[in-house]
Amino acid sequence: MKKYHLATYGCQMNEYDSAMIAQQLDARGCIETSNQEDADFIIVNTCSVREKAEDTAIANISKLKYLRKKNPDVKVVVCGCMAKNRGPELLKRLKNVNYIVGPDQYRKIPELLLDGDDSPLHKTHHRMFIDEDREENYLGEYAKLQSDFSTFVTIQRGCNKRCSYCIVPYLRGPEKYRDTNDVLEEVKRAADKGVSEVMLLGQTVNAYKTADADFATLLTKVSEIGGIKRIRFTSPHPRHYTNELIDVLLNNPKVCHYAHIPLQSGSDAMLKKMRRQHNMEQYMTVIEQLRSKDPFYGISTDVICGFVGETADDFEQTMKAFEACQFDTAFMFIYSPREGTESAKETEILSAEEKLERHTRLVELQNSITLKRNEMMLGRTEELLVEQNSARDESELRGRTDNYKKVIFKPEAGRIIKPGDYVKVKLDDIRGWTIRGTLV
């Protein structure tokens, strides 16, 4: 019986795709292994959002050469965004790689690995499969569950936005929306296996629209599936928050009060230069609507420090935006040009030291806001979905609130609590950045 090992880099969509590939191989009688030395097949699902992610993946793939000595027949597949972005170069540079497979060609992987010389794919002598397929939405293909109680479901692939700094639309193609009934079928199958939390995925997930449903309607339909208690999604775009969607987000009890809404800059001039298709007024309107009914609504964001052409005033506007938005958390990146994007063609005006200084200031501001937002939670009783044991103390457990706050608590003696359970906890302390609670 053949064994495969999956290594995944990058976003949740890559994690979902890896789980889908795993399900395809499982259906052909293969077994997944966490030990790459035991594997007959090694599949590396890669990311191209930042050059560092590519460099890390390439370095780790290069290290796989030693496995050939143990098993000369081991096959290595590189898939994902880097496969599409740098396919020919990877084949030339990484001699231990057998196949390069792009995001629209994952159905070929089981045939490439298992059908041997009889496969029509082998008879073509191709080793690279990276063509874009605008019709491929993997209908009828369902991912292996990420856990017994929570899983991802991709509802949209590709992106139409073409932000000037982002390479993703060039690699994953234009937006494709998965058939509504196919989405619901995957969620139902997961719920039938005990999953109670689902996260819907898409590059601009709230732009979802088919003949049967828009995103607001889809959320409602998912909430009607028995066994589903929590619905999350990522990543929404500020432009696609309709009044109907806001109503569902605030009033459907199964849709969690948390969203990761990328900002990228607080300056309208920079947002226009980035081709973000929203301005600060539109962004703030979304924040205000979400927190109008629930001031504890969890919001996180992405921001780029030192984007090409960013002035001191542009950056100060970003600082003011953070003050106004009061993000619970933020992912803050120092800008670096990404080859193949529009912004990479422009001349930078900031030194590395200037960009780092701005980044440091923003991190310090966000740290103070995060602490304040966490302190606001103290005294509240919240329902947690238990996820795992605490990394620091195996006798304690970690769970998430509806608004995505991580909470550590100690179970009562004699009471069995396991991952996937829901418990009520009173939030009564903060240690470092972590909220702690006591079982109610």
Image: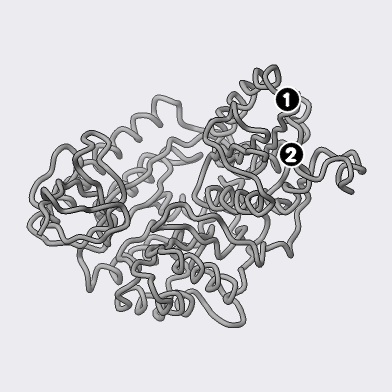
User: Is 133 placed above or below 70 here?
Assistant: below
Give SS at disc 2: strand
Task: Please give left or right for residue 100 compared with residue 242 in the image.
Answer: right
Q: Which residue occupies the foreground of this view, 218 or 399?
A: 399
In this rendering, the answer to whether 10 lies above or below 20 is above
Color scheme of the displayed model? one colour
The answer to whether 109 appears left or right of 146 in the picture is right
Label 2, on which residue?
100
Q: Position of residue 220 (x, y in %)?
A: 42, 79
Q: Residue at x 42, y 56 (%)?
A: 268
- Labels 1 & 2 near each other (Cβ < 8 A): no
Disc 1 residue type (three-letter): Asn
The residue at the point 71 percent across, 29 percent down is 74
Residue 135 picture location, percent across and down: 74, 65
The quadrant the N terminus occupies is top right
Residue 27 picture location, percent across and down: 65, 54
Q: Quadrant of the C terminus?
A: bottom left
SS of the residue under disc 1? loop
Q: Residue at x 31, y 32 (%)?
A: 360
Q: Is residue 273 visible?
A: no
Q: Nearer the viewer, residue 96 or 244?
A: 96
Q: Residues within 10 Å of mark 1 (few under 14, many from 20)?
A: many
Residue 222 lies left or right of residue 393; in this view the side is right
Residue behind mark 1: 96
Figure check: 380 above or below 36: below
Q: CA distance from mark 1 to mark 2?
A: 11 Å
The disc labelled 2 sits on which kind of residue?
A: Ile
